[in-house]
Image (tube, rainbow, N blue to C red):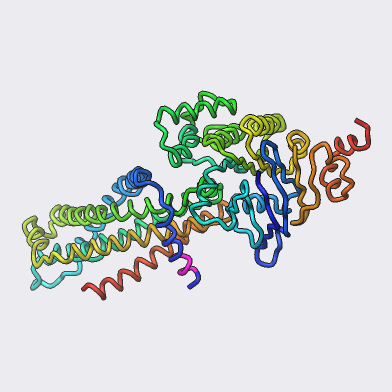
Amino acid sequence: MIKINSISKSFKDKTVLNSISGEFDKGKCNLIIGASGTGKSVLLKCIVGLLPPDSGNVYFDLRNFTEADKEMKSEIRREIGMLFQGGALFDSKNVEENIMFPLDILTKMSLEEKRERVNFCLKRVGLEQVNKKMPSEISGGMKKRVGIARAIVNNPNYLFCDEPNSGLDPQTSILIDELILEITHEFDITTVVVTHDMNSVMGIGEKIMFLYKGDKLWEGSNQEIMSSGLKELDDFVFTNKIMKNLKAGKI
Amino acid sequence: MKAFGKYILFLGSLFVRRETFMTYYKLVFEECIQIGVRSIFLFVLVSTFMGAVTTVQTAYNMVSPLIPRFVISQVVREMTILELAPTIMAIIFAGKVGSSMAGGIGTMRITEQIDALEVMGINSSSYLVLPKIIASLLMYPLLVIVSGVCALLGGYLVGTLTGVLTPTEYVQGVRFGFQEFGVSFALIKSFVFAFLISSISSFKGYYTHGGALEVGIASTQAVTSSVIAVLLADYFLAQLLL
């Protein structure tokens, strides 16, 4: 479980996050949603330590990550897997080397064991026979899958995904969402997904945190989101015709 | 001053939370190939022509019959060892290797590859930059030696083929009044320049933010700042050591 306590973050005069608190449950797909520019990615970066919060604390299973020393931070980070928006695959390494990289750095496994683990992860994300391909030779959806494979290769306790289906077609987006949900349940990890995609919200949002202009306005599940009664959330959720008709009971 | 302070802190960050020796060993070798081996052709080409042109121009300016012809190659030797091989080549090194370092690291920054390293618990600055600096310190002095030899050979070829001076005169001039400290001075300079170029270029790349345009700007700034630092260091080293 990950707990955040009064996280605030400003850039110069602009307040991006205003005292955000909440919990992300283990074995669940926890979503941070909101319109563009509401601070979702900044919150995610504060949680994983890529940005230091101005105030507040982040706890990984009761371990205070924000105030931890470098050793402890490094230890916690080694339990984290992260899928970045563009995949963030290393251009100079092929698919196999990319996925193997955390194992090279963080473990003392033999090359054979590492290869076995890489192939298992590739198979798990539905990719095979791409080991020797370079990132520039594979599609956006495949990059995301490789990114997921790299994120789970080291058996993380926490999985973070920053807009996992941005730039993907609807069909591939659903596949990626389903994959994230399956992996979360299969490995019983705490998954936090930042998204503004309503398909993701409805498909995998077991626990949802809604951000609006740097504030947390609502928390609940995808079952409850339709009847929140909160204007800002309704404006976000019911933007397209299908969702409006769904709310009006026409579908 | 703020940027200088940031640069000093950046240098300090290279030596904390390092990875294993073997990790750096492999990376340094890869960088040596990238920085050193792939620069040899350019260095050989430029320095050979540099030596040739220096010979022709020195001969053109030596009009007095009282000055012996071997002085031409003596001048070529002194210019090559003291300035052309370490300093002018440093400017070329900054243009080729420095901009590539800044561009490469800058691209890794804007495509979140550096963030990916940090999330894995890896000190990204140490992992990415330290091998580049070590490889530069290993390879640039070697490139300077190659460059010096090629410049002297270029001078020899042009000098003898055009009849400016005989092979014996050229060799006599190269050996006349030779001081070993000149080579030591060139090597000291090459170590300093290699460190400045690789660290400044990496620094510029590491703190890139934005998009492709900013990566281009970072590459340009890396070359500009490196060249200024090299020229300043050249002056101070000359004052200090000569």
> Is residue A120 toward the left or the right of residue A58 in the image?
left
**Residue B38, magenta (yes or no):** no
What residue lies at 29% left-to-right and 52% top-to-bottom? Answer: B139
* Residue in front for this viewpoint, B230 or A2: A2
Is residue B57 visible in the rendered image? The answer is: no
Q: How far across and down, in percent of the image, does residue A239 sit?
A: 84, 43
Name of the residue lying farthest toward the bottom: B239
Q: How far across and down, in percent of the image, does residue B75 sit?
A: 17, 66
> Is residue B179 toward the left or the right of residue A132 in the image?
left
* Residue in front for this viewpoint, B82 or B201: B201
Q: How far across and down, in percent of the image, does residue A109 sit?
A: 42, 33
* Residue in front for this viewpoint, A67 or A45: A67
Residue B125 lies in what quarter of the image? bottom left
Quarter in which the C terminus of chain A is drawn: top right
Q: How far across and down, in percent of the image, does residue A243 sit?
A: 86, 37
> Is residue A197 toward the left or the right of residue B128 in the image?
right
Q: Is residue B183 above or below residue A73?
A: below
Quarter in which the N terminus of chain A is drawn: top right
Q: Is residue A192 above or below residue B12?
A: above
Q: How many marks?
A: 0
Residue B11 lies in what quarter of the image? bottom left
Is residue B30 visible in the rendered image? The answer is: yes
Q: Range of the magenta residues?
A: B3-7
Secondary structure mostly seen in magenta is helix
Name of the residue lying farthest toward the front: A62
